[in-house]
Amino acid sequence: MQLAEALKEGLVDGIPKPERHIETWLSDIFLYEDVGRKVTKHVSDEAVGDFVDPLKRKNFYRADFAWNNLFAPEIYTSLEGMREINGGWKPSEHNTADDFFILMNRIDADDTLINRLWNKKVTKEDVVRITEKLLINLDRANEKYFDEQNRELGKSVYERMIARLSNFRDFARSASGISQEVTDSRANALVHFHASHPYFKKLPESSASVTIDGHSANIVFIENKPVFMDVYWPMPAFRIVDHALATARIAACVRIFGGDELAGAMYDTYRRKRTLPPKEILDFYEAYNAFVMGYYFTHIKRHELIQPYFIFADARLSALQA
């Protein structure tokens, strides 16, 4: 029995049955009275990575915990090793562990940016705080990880975006209920715009930035302050991008569900710290990220959120092609 199943059924010694089980695309999260336990799913997917091979799985856990503990230590507290013995699971040192879970302080997992946007409860102050916190997080990420990630990837920002768009096609094709023809048409249009606009090929390396997986479902509010959680990208090519892309990613969600004024407040906040790309580049980044979120919510079956993303992204991409 895998660790996630044992936790779900309350079959791990010393750990009760969880009060709630949250399933994300890559993780099972089990919530208890005061804590949560996060287990990575046993999947191997070309679009994401190999989380079945024991060594790759262990290395992913270590990196996932290190990044999340850096940006949200109030949530992510420790990485716990577990060993399967005679059909049961026992605590273990990391070097002898068969699997792991990340121990988390329990938070209100429903108080996320996307839920506030859906319920029309996001203010200008909220999005300004989110942008300010994002920029602080990106500064910290670059200080700690830029040299390491740059050496590991060894590609220009332009080449990384090509890899990112290729990955998007694979990710989107794996979503159920959407025609491959529609998905390929969207992916082809994104690739064509990126390949044909001179901005991307001329993008200086000084614009390169380590980024985090900071979308609207990964931003929670603790005491009404935004905290970025589950930030580690499993795909190496995703970890260094044009600096503005991370802000545009969230701005797409804010624009779709909160309107142009709130999205504009994000860019105004960004502009006080750094130079923004041209409008058509931000439009491209928003369209791309809206497609990603539409397919993401298709994967996790949040059906009410899917069409607003696709309607926005299709319209924005069509305008860019005009």
Image (spheres, rainbow, N blue to C red):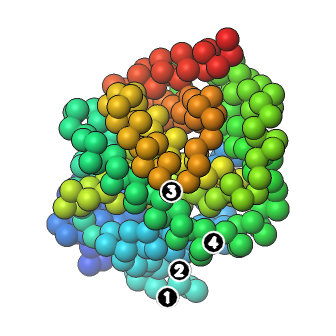
Residue at mark 4 to residue at mark 1: CA–CA distance = 26 Å
What's the mark number on residue 273? 3
Q: Which residue is mark 4?
A: 145
- Nearer the viewer's eye, disc 4 or disc 3? 3
- Residue at (22% x, 33% y) in the render: 119
Q: Does residue 89 appear in the picture of this structure?
A: no
> In this orientation, which residue lies closer to the viewer: 66 or 5?
66
Labels 4 & 1 near each other (Cβ < 8 A): no
- Residue at (46% x, 85% y) in the render: 92
Q: Residues within 10 Å of mark 4 (few under 14, many from 20)?
A: some
Q: Earlier in the sequence, mark 4 or mark 3?
A: 4
Mark 3 belongs to which amino acid? Lys
Q: Which residue is mark 1?
A: 93
Q: Which quadrant: the N terminus? A: bottom left
> In this orientation, which residue lies closer to the viewer: 118 or 171?
118
Instruction: Return the x and y of residue 86 as percentages of the image width and height.
Output: 45, 77
Location of residue 262 (image quadrant): top left
Q: Earlier in the sequence, mark 3 or mark 1?
A: 1
Residue at the limit of the structure toward the front, as seen here: 272
Residue at mark 4 to residue at mark 2: CA–CA distance = 27 Å
Measured along the vertical axis of the image, is residue 143 above or below residue 30?
below
Q: Which residue is mark 2?
A: 97
